[in-house]
Structure formats: C-alpha cells, structure tokens
Amino acid sequence: MKLACSVRGRPREFDADAALAAALRVFWSKGYEGASLSDLTEAMGITRPSLYAAFGNKEALFKQALDLYEREKLDYIGESLKEPTARKVAEHLLRSALEMQKSSCDPRGCMGVINAVACGADAESIRAEVIHRGRIAKQALIERFEQAKREGDLPPETDAVGLTSFLIAIMQGLAVQGGAGASCQDLTSLIDTSLAMWPGK
C-alpha cells in the first residue's frame, strides 16, 4: 500500500506495508520501550511527521506491527488447531515455533514474550495488549483440548487448562532459549522430550 507524505510542501509516496514491516523488526528486536522513534523512522525510511500521519503515535504503530506479526509469523497457531489429534496440535505448534527460531531473516525470540516481560510501568498498556492477545490464543487451545477429551483423543481426566499452560510454557521456553543462542539440536531435544510426555495418543 502506497501512502503520500508531505516533505517541505511536496508530497512523496512511500510503501506503508514495507515501512510497517520494518517497524515490526525494530519492535521485535528491541522491544516496545527499547525502540526509539529515531530507530523506527530510520528503519522505516520516513520522517516523524510521516509516521504520525500514516500510523498514529508509537503505541498505535506497535499495535499495527503486532497485527502484522500475528498474521505473518503466528499463522501456524490457527493451522495447528486443525490437526486431527491433540498430540499433532502440540507437535505442529512446537515444531513451527522452532522453525521461527531457525529463521535467519527474522530476529530471534518471541515478540510477545519480549514485550510482555520487558515493559515497565510507562508501557503497561502495551503489556496488557500483548497479554490479552495471548489469552485469546490460549483459550482457543483450551477449547481444542476439551474437544479432544470429548472425542476420546485425550484421557477424560486431562486438565485442558493445565495442558495448555504446559504447552505455552514450552513454546515460550523455545523462544527465550532460541533468543539466548541455544542450538537447534538442543531445542529439538526439548520438543521431543515434551512430546514424549504427552498424554493419550
């Protein structure tokens, strides 16, 4: 999407989609508070007035970047829910999360984890937004595992909430360890061990 911005009275077009993708990379690598407006405008190739005109303030820009992150980087979560068994749901999630960590094109770690734990009091609304979105994904997983219990795919005594929390903890661990430089072999071993403990089929 092309947008026009005014530079000394003369309009100039810039690619808003490319600018937003650049902003995403800055927020992903530095976190919300660590990303300065100078960092953002330099990466996006636009001026501050153009940023404000096209995207709103820094908080609004972050939320748009988070939307892009969910569409392009976390689409595997929705795909995993379509798997035929609960174990395959878990495996699809974990192995897809690992593929993200192996990417040489994107920053390491998870944008959601980075911004949920690294935000101070001044960015509490950002932290709340990230946590809210995480709860939506968590609820979808809980409902999928409750369905698996009804279908006999998981033992009837399975705690769907606890199982979901376990799975999310492993995914967050992959992101944190991946961001800290853990090897692909170590992260694969973590996934294999987690799946070996999976209840049911």
Image (tube, rainbow, N blue to C red):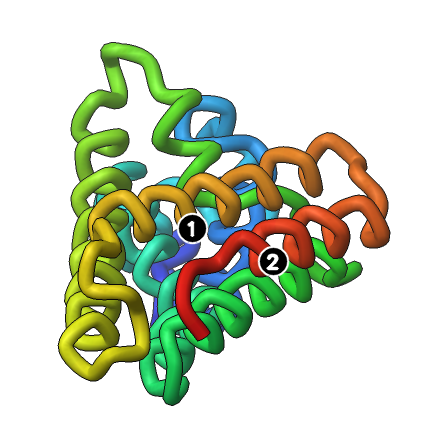
Q: Return the residue nearer the eye: 29 or 135.
A: 135
Element under label 1?
A: helix
Identify the image quadrant of residue 188.
Answer: bottom right
Q: Return the residue nearer the eye: 177 or 54.
A: 177
* Residue situated furthest top in the rendering: 121
Residue 3 in picture, x, y percent from top left: 35, 73
Does residue 49 appear left or right of residue 194 in this picture? left
Q: Quadrant of the N terminus?
A: bottom left
Does residue 101 appear left or right of residue 186 in this picture? left
**Residue 107 visible in this rendered orientation of the protein:** yes
Q: Quadrant of the C terminus?
A: bottom left
Does residue 40 appear left or right of residue 82 in this picture? right
User: Badge 1 is on which residue?
Assistant: 167
Does residue 184 appear left or right of residue 43 in this picture? right
Indicate whether 190 appears above or below 3.
Answer: above
Spatial CA distance of label 2 from label 1 is: 13 Å
User: Badge 2 is on which residue?
Assistant: 196
Q: Rate crowding at label 1 as few (under 14), some (14 to 19) or many (20 or more) other CA atoms within 10 Å.
A: many
Residue 154 in picture, x, y percent from top left: 30, 69
Is mark 2 in CB contact (under 8 Å) with mark 1? no
Residue 16 in picture, x, y percent from top left: 41, 69
Q: Return the residue nearer the eye: 107 or 58.
A: 107
Look at 17% across and 75% down and name the residue there.
Answer: 147
Which of the two discs, 2 and 1, sits closer to the camera? 2
Dot label at residue 179: none
Look at 35% across and 31% down and name the residue there.
Answer: 116
Residue 37 in picture, x, y percent from top left: 45, 32
Three-letter code, disc 2: Ala
Q: Who comes first in sequence, dot 2 or dot 1?
A: 1
Element under label 2?
A: helix
Three-letter code, disc 1: Leu
Indicate whether 118 appears above or below 178.
Answer: above
